[in-house]
Amino acid sequence: MIAWYLYIAYGLQAKQPGDWARIQSYFFRSLSVQFFRTRIDLDKLRAIQTFVAVADGRGFAAAARKLDVSAATVTRLLSELETALGVTLVQRTTRQVTLTDTGKRYLQYVRAVLEDLSVADEATQGARGKP
């Protein structure tokens, strides 16, 4: 079964005796990379939720209270998100946090994504116990 999947997904074929070990090694390395990417995506989701909380609360302290984490954690997650995206999402001053134009657009997109995830969760949980 794995050989067939590898053949279809990667166009790999065993032509010599040691090829199956090489192909399987390649396959499992690919799986571990996909798992790692999923982990990054979960971390990014947490950072996105933090960004939305900062935008809603208009500050790091309010977001920290809402998410029940420290203000330092909120700052770190938002900085990591901005670094990953390569943009500045919020302007920080000593008194307030305001969204940049890019941050405002990004907020619209991620709100829609988070809403879709919420709807999917509710629909899935509503189907519990049904075959």
Image (tube, helix red, strand yellow):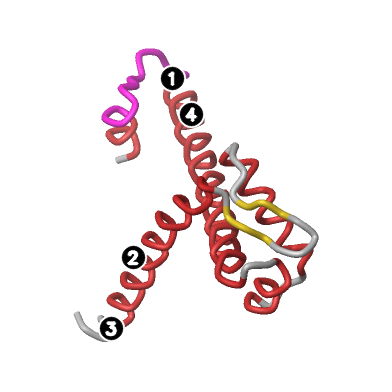
Q: Is residue 2 above or below residue 131?
A: above
Residue that mark 3 sits on: 126
Q: Is residue 37 above or below residue 64?
A: above
Residue that mark 4 sits on: 26
Q: Secondary structure at mark 3?
A: helix
Percent across and percent down for residue 35 are 52, 47
Question: Taking 69 as reference, is 46 left or right?
Answer: left
- Give the distance between the C-alpha atoms of the residues marked 1 and 2, in whole angstroms: 44 Å
Q: Which residues are magenta?
A: 7-18
Instruction: Determine the image quadrant of residue 96.
Output: bottom right
- Give the distance between the C-alpha atoms of the residues marked 4 and 3, in whole angstroms: 40 Å
Verify CB contact (< 8 Å) between mark 1 and mark 2: no
Mark 4 vs mark 1: in front: 4
Q: Residue at x 50, y 50 (%)?
A: 38
Q: Residue at x 34, y 38 (%)?
A: 2
Which quadrant, please, contains the C terminus? bottom left
The outermost residue toward the bottom is 129
Q: Earlier in the sequence, mark 4 or mark 1?
A: 1
Mark 3 vs mark 2: in front: 2
Question: Taking 9 as reference, is 69 left or right?
Answer: right
Q: Earlier in the sequence, mark 4 or mark 3?
A: 4
Residue that mark 2 sits on: 116
Residue that mark 1 sits on: 19
Q: Secondary structure at mark 1?
A: helix
Viewer-side residue, 114 vs 105: 105
- Give the distance between the C-alpha atoms of the residues marked 4 and 1, in whole angstroms: 10 Å
Kind of residue at badge 3: Gly
Q: Determine the main secondary structure of the stretch shown in magenta.
A: loop
Percent across and percent down for residue 21 are 48, 27
Q: Is residue 17 magenta?
A: yes
Kind of residue at badge 2: Asp
